[in-house]
Image (cartoon, rainbow, N blue to C red):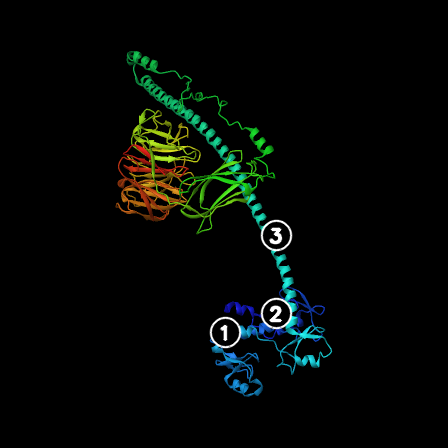
Amino acid sequence: MMHNLKEEVTCSVCIHLYTNPKQLPCLHIFCLECLNDLARTSARHGKIKCPICQTEVAVPESGTMETLPSCFYVKNLLDTLAIKQCNTSKVTCGNCDAKSEEASYCFHCGKFWCKDCLNAHNILKENKEHRVLALKDFQDEDFEDVLKRPAFCQKELHEKELLKFYCKVCEVPVCQTCVIVDHNKHEVEHLELAARAVQNEIASKLKIVKQSSQTFTGYILELEETSQKLEHCSQVTQEQIRKTAKSLVFAIQQQEKKLTGKVEIEARALLENSTNGKAKFQDQRKKTEEIIKQAERLLERSTGAELVRNKTAIGELFQGLQDPQEPNTSSTNDLGEKAPRYSQATTDLKTVTVFMKNGEISKCLQELGIGRVATFKTATEANQCSVERFQAATAGLETEIEVITRNSKGEQYYCPEDYLTLELISEHEDRNTAVDINIIDKNNGSYILSFIPSQAGKHLLTIQINGETIADFSLIDIKERSYMPVGFIGKGHIDGTKLKQPWGVTVDSSNEIFVTDMGNNRIVVFNAKGEFMRSFGENFLTLSCPNGLIADNTGGIFVANRESNNIVFFRGEGNFARTVHDATSLKEPSYRGITLDSQGNLIVCDSENQCVKLISPHGEILKTIGTGWVMPNNCLFYKNKIFVADRDAHLIKVFSSTGRFLYEFGRYGSGDGELNKPTGLAVDKTGHLLVCSLGNNRVQVFTLDGKFVTKFGEKGVGLGQMLSPCSVSVLKSGQIVVCEFENDRLQFFQ
């Protein structure tokens, strides 16, 4: 209150408390001296401008602004401020100008009096009826009296006269003496009556102006809402353009990988054939050169008898030599396909593999573009649309909502250009906590909106169509996740063979589940429902105790082999593509988890070498991460951080994307937050870290900085029980898949 009061009585020109405050016709108030300075320095054509609103005000011929009306209310506010501050500053006596700590205020005089001057004031008979109060004794009602203190005439010899009348001719308030001396022939009325009439007039005009202000406010809010809708529409349209462009880029990149992979396979077959042919010719040349040396030595050193005696042997040596023949290098490549014919060292260089550019694509893209920007008018009415289906929502699990779009008649209506958005705003923080938002357009006015709440608690759900809110939901309660078991995969025969010691599990971008069936030297693929799709790897002799695996963003799969000690790459459908890294730096035997960083580089846990390696997609070792490892077993890259499970140290170690150590958490034990041989790692849809504790037969849940949240699973073979959980992954729905090494199965948790 004190701060606001001081602002009210501070001149905006000199930034000091008002001294002799004067009011301009625009109702703004300034110190008299400030206005006089403005008149002296800035007047143009006899006018000055209000420093606040720039309204022009005429300067009197005298050059001073003295004749402007005084502001009595501000004078009373200044007195109020002085009274309130009397405990911290001295008050100036209105008679002797001395500063005093013990002062009083006369409500009639409107002055402060020191102790000595107050005695003189009270002696005068004419001041006998004056109300005087010590500043230290002021109460709230006394401050109100100061603010409502009546105005006194400012004319000389009239100072003690109250302004009681209003001169209609001069349009000024006057005192009794003024009426007799200066306005005796003018029409006057009682000031209170005139003030009441002016008050009513101002109130009437104020009501009209307030209505206008409310109208303006309505217009502004309407335009702001329109601007927000336009901005939102622009953002949605831009996002649609970006998504379309990304999908085309992705399709082109897929084609690039497919074609370059094909060229790579063909080139590898040709190079292998060439290398084998070269080695064969080199062997034949070596034998031929050896016989040449022996024959030349025989000719140079042997007698005639020796030559005759060795004639048969020399003939047999020459006969054993093969004549150079053009090799037919037609062979089969790694896919069992016939490789292109490769000619001898003097091959026909005109027969080459080239890339034939599809010029029509570039031409179509230039002519047709990726789409067009168009305007449309829809008959969809947001206030008629309805939410037909809404399930209870759980943090970390997919929730579905069905929205029906309708026209003004309430009829189901479909416009292809309508766009829907969904926001889930936390009660405690202003951000959208919904992740993996997906909208399925059924092309009939029905839309399925799915999303995953990333945190529990009270949330406000907002669904909009074309920028307008469809329905106002009350706060909805997002439930905490309970990690309930819902079923198994792998109990029984799969494609004629049971799972045997499954080690690694990953989910690719198409929501397929890939499992390394280590005991059967194969990769098994299931859909999100747990139904068998296919298996691969067992027929190519490329898998030997496969353990760690990870899917890239193209659907390809990197697999770490334990016994053959290498890393291989398969295309998503299961075709072997290449060996990424051989056994030159990896040590056997080695359980090794692998993951990919944001640049597409492999992060590999080389357990037997007690290190973590960063390897390029082409197999080049870029760096070794961290020191002091005991047995790094599995790893995860998330939000530019590398999480590594050091199994036998019972720790989770965390590094930056460049390999700089950040922090670690965990310790050996069976209590909450304690670990026993941590292995598999994943991050669920709430952003929590899942850690398979193999020795404790459970999965523990942590925040990314290592705070324990909860746990699920216990030792056993039943539903919800585990034996040696070694890896974990998360489906698009938020369901969790746990790979159990000793139970030879996968288990789903909701």
Q: Given this view, does label 3 or label 2 mark the residue nearer the observer? A: 3
Q: Disc 1 versus disc 2: distance between alpha carbons?
A: 22 Å
Residue underneath mark 1: 84
Using the image, tell me which numbered label, if any, was put on residue 612: none
Task: Give the camera-side residue of 349 and 48.
Answer: 48
Within the image, what quadrant is residue 8 found in?
A: bottom right
Q: Position of residue 22 (x, y in %)?
A: 63, 72
- Residue type, numbered disc 1: Lys
Using the image, tell me which numbered label, if any, was put on residue 29: 2
* Mark 3 or mark 1: whose residue is earlier in sequence: 1
* Mark 3 or mark 2: whose residue is earlier in sequence: 2
Pointer 3 local density, CA inside 10 Å: few below 14, some 14–19, many at least 20: few
- Residue type, numbered disc 3: Tyr
Query: Given contact means CB atoms under 8 Å apart, are the residues at marks 3 and 1 in contact?
Result: no
Q: Position of residue 323 (x, y in %)?
A: 39, 15
- Residue type, numbered disc 2: Ile
Task: Give the camera-side residue of 747 and 726.
Answer: 747
